[in-house]
């Protein structure tokens, strides 16, 4: 039951991250364009995704630690991926997004911040994906 819950939570988190990056943000940009309300909406959505992701990561890490897995290395890898995803989310919301909110849209400085944000967000997404794949392949200890 714990493994199913971990997989479900990680799948929801992964789905939310992917949906935001590849569906919501590009669609919002296409319909609203590079405006202050667009930037504020995107910033608010990133903050919410990180906050929800933090709770999912804490829950999944707790489940991973208290359940017995066949491999301690797999458990450690899952927890490490979750910790890195949370850390990158913190960097995104505490350092990058606030700078983006203070920078004029469509300027070289904003574009550089956007590239940095995309790299950090993409890395966090990758760590969640790895944790999800590891959780799908895990086996309980006998």
Image (cartoon, rainbow, N blue to C red):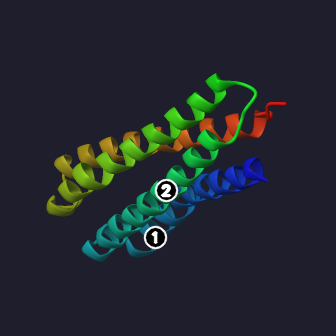
The local secondary structure at tag 1 comes to helix
Specify which label sits upstream in the sequence, 1 or 2.
Answer: 1
Compared to residue 55, the image places residue 122 above or below, namely above
Compared to residue 54, the image places residue 70 above or below, namely above
Please name whichever residue, 63 or 9, is drawn nearer the observer in this view of the structure.
63
Label 2 belongs to which residue?
53
Label 1 belongs to which residue?
28
Q: CA distance from mark 1 to mark 2?
A: 22 Å
| Quarter of the rendering containing residue 61 | top right
Q: Residue at x 22, y 49 (%)?
A: 95
Total label count? 2
Specify the label residue 135 is tagged with.
none
Q: Is residue 35 left or right of residue 52?
A: left
Compared to residue 38, the image places residue 113 above or below, namely above
Q: How many other residues sit within 10 Å of disc 1, few (<14), some (14-19) or many (≥20)?
A: some
| Quarter of the rendering containing residue 115 | top left
Q: How many other residues sit within 10 Å of disc 2, few (<14), some (14-19) or many (≥20)?
A: many
Q: Is residue 137 left or right of residue 31?
A: right
In x, y percent, where is residue 24? Answer: 52, 66
Q: Residue at x 63, y 56 (%)?
A: 15
Compared to residue 33, the image places residue 67 above or below, namely above
Quadrant containing the C terminus in the rendered view? top right
In x, y percent, where is residue 71? Answer: 70, 24
In x, y percent, where is residue 16? Answer: 57, 60
The local secondary structure at tag 2 comes to helix
């Amino acid at each position: 039951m714990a493994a199913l819950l971990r997989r479900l939570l990680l799948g929801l988190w992964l789905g939310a991250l992917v949906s935001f990056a590849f569906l919501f943000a590009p669609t919002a940009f296409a319909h609203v364009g590079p405006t202050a309300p667009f930037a504020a909406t995107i910033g608010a959505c990133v903050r919410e995704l990180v906050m929800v992701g933090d709770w999912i990561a804490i829950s999944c890490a707790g489940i991973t630690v208290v359940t017995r897995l066949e491999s301690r290395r797999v458990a450690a890898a899952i927890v490490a991926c979750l910790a890195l995803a949370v850390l990158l989310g913190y960097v995104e919301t505490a350092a990058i997004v606030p700078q983006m909110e203070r920078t004029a849209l469509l300027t070289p400085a904003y574009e550089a911040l956007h590239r940095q944000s995309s790299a950090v967000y993409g890395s966090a997404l990758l760590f969640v994906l790895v944790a999800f794949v590891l959780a799908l392949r895990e086996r309980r200890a006998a």
